[in-house]
Image: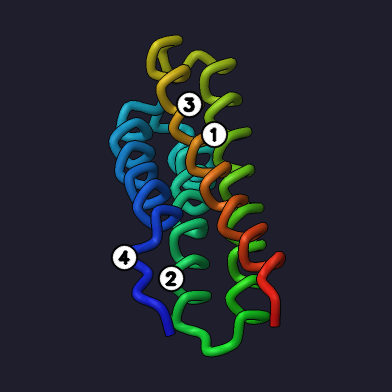
Amino acid sequence: MRNYTELKAFQSSDAIVLLIYRTTENFPKQEMFGLTNQLRRAAVSTVSNIVEGASRYSEVDFLRFLDMAYGSACEVEYQVSLAYRLGYIEKSQYEMLKEKCSEAAKVLNGLIRSLRNKKP
C-alpha cells in the first residue's frame, strides 16, 4: 500500500477538486443537476480513483485505478472548456483551470508511464 497523500498526482488533482467546487458555486442554478454536478463528480472521481488505487496491493490494480483517474481528469478538462464556452466562467478563470487540469493530467500520465515501464 502507498501513502496517497505523498503522490504529486493526488496533490494536484485534490487542489483541482477544491477549485472546481469554488468555481461551480457561481454556475447558473439550472445547471445544479447538469454540468455543475457532472464537473464536480468527475473531479472527485479523479482523486478518489488515485486514493483507491493506492490502497491496492498489486501494481496491476493500482494502474487500473490510475487509468480510470486519468479518464476522469480528461473529462474535467473537457467540462471546464464547455463551461467557458457556455459563458459560465471568465477567460482568465478558464485559462487558469485549463492549465491546472493539464498539469495534473501530465503528472498522472507520468506516474502511469513510470509504473508501466517498471521492470518486474
**Type of residue at label 3?**
Glu
Q: Nearer the viewer, residue 49 or 60?
A: 60
Residue wearing tag 4: 5
Residue wearing tag 1: 102
Q: Is residue 87 above or below residue 45?
A: above
On residue 60, the disc is none
* Disc 1 packing (10 Å; few <14; some 14–19; many ≥20): some
Instruction: State the residue at coordinates (57%, 42%).
Output: 106
Quadrant the C terminus occupies: bottom right
**Type of residue at label 1?**
Ser
**Type of residue at label 4?**
Thr
Numbered disc total: 4
**Type of residue at label 2?**
Val
Q: Decide: marks 1, 3 in contact (CB < 8 A)? A: yes
Residue wearing tag 3: 99
Quadrant of residue 34 in the image?
top right
* First reached walking from the N terminus: tag 1 or tag 2: 2
The x, y position of residue 58, in whole percent, is 59, 87
| Left or right of residue 38, residue 47 in this image | left
Instruction: State the residue at coordinates (39%, 11%).
Output: 92
Measure the alpha-carbon separation of dots 1 and 3: 5 Å
Residue wearing tag 2: 51
Instruction: State the residue at coordinates (47%, 47%).
Output: 37
| Left or right of residue 116, residue 90 in this image | left
Instruction: State the residue at coordinates (62%, 51%).
Output: 109
* First reached walking from the N terminus: tag 2 or tag 3: 2
* First reached walking from the N terminus: tag 4 or tag 1: 4
